[in-house]
Image: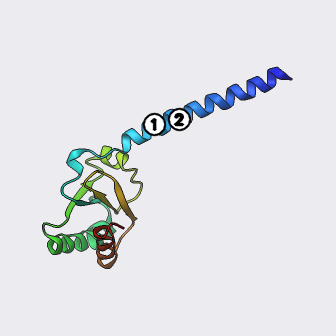
Amino acid sequence: MIERLLLAVGILLALWIGWCLIACAQRRLARPRATDVEGPLTLLYFHTPTCGPCRLIQTPILEAMAAEWKEKVNVRPVDVTADPEAAARYRVWTVPTTMWVDASGIVRAVNNGVVSAEDLRRQWRQLQHGG
């Protein structure tokens, strides 16, 4: 009886250690690089050349927003087919995905799928006010 209990505890301990190692590796992968972030706020835009909603809807919205924000926000497009490592770092599973990242590299907001200009403005205002 005690052998089975020790075996069960050993298995649970091994599973827990494995989970800790995987979580540590994921955190290391998720760290943004210095080249990902410029200025106080960066809007990362993950897309692919073959993504219809990206090309037809999201890209025009983000181009208009970049022109509106000028120097206030850096809008950085990331082609996940050309830079799959960036998609892995930020755990991007769908395109289009937009992600607000602050100057310290902390992801502040994530939008999976097409996001409207109004929603992006609202998020930007919230982030400007420390939200």
Residue 123, compared with residue 39, is above or below; it is below
Residue 93, compared with residue 69, is above or below; it is above
Taking the spot 37% from the left edge, 41% from the top edge, the residue there is 29
Cβ atoms at labels 1 and 2 below 8 Å apart: yes
Taking the spot 55% from the left edge, 36% from the top edge, the residue there is 19
Name the kind of residue labelled 2 in the image: Cys
- Comparing 58 with 37, the one in front is 37
Residue ID for mark 1: 24
Residue ID for mark 2: 20
Specify the farthest residue to the front: 130
In which image quadrant can residue 28 be found?
Answer: top left
Relative side of 116 to 6, left or right: left
Residue 103 on image: x %, y %: 25, 54
Label 1 and label 2: CA atoms lie apart by 6 Å
Residue 47, compared with residue 128, is above or below; it is above
How packed mark 2 is, by other alpha carbons closer than 10 Å (few <14, some 14-19, many 20 or more), is few
The quadrant the N terminus occupies is top right
Taking the spot 20% from the left edge, 65% from the top edge, the residue there is 73
Relative side of 71 to 85, left or right: left
Residue 63 on image: x %, y %: 19, 70
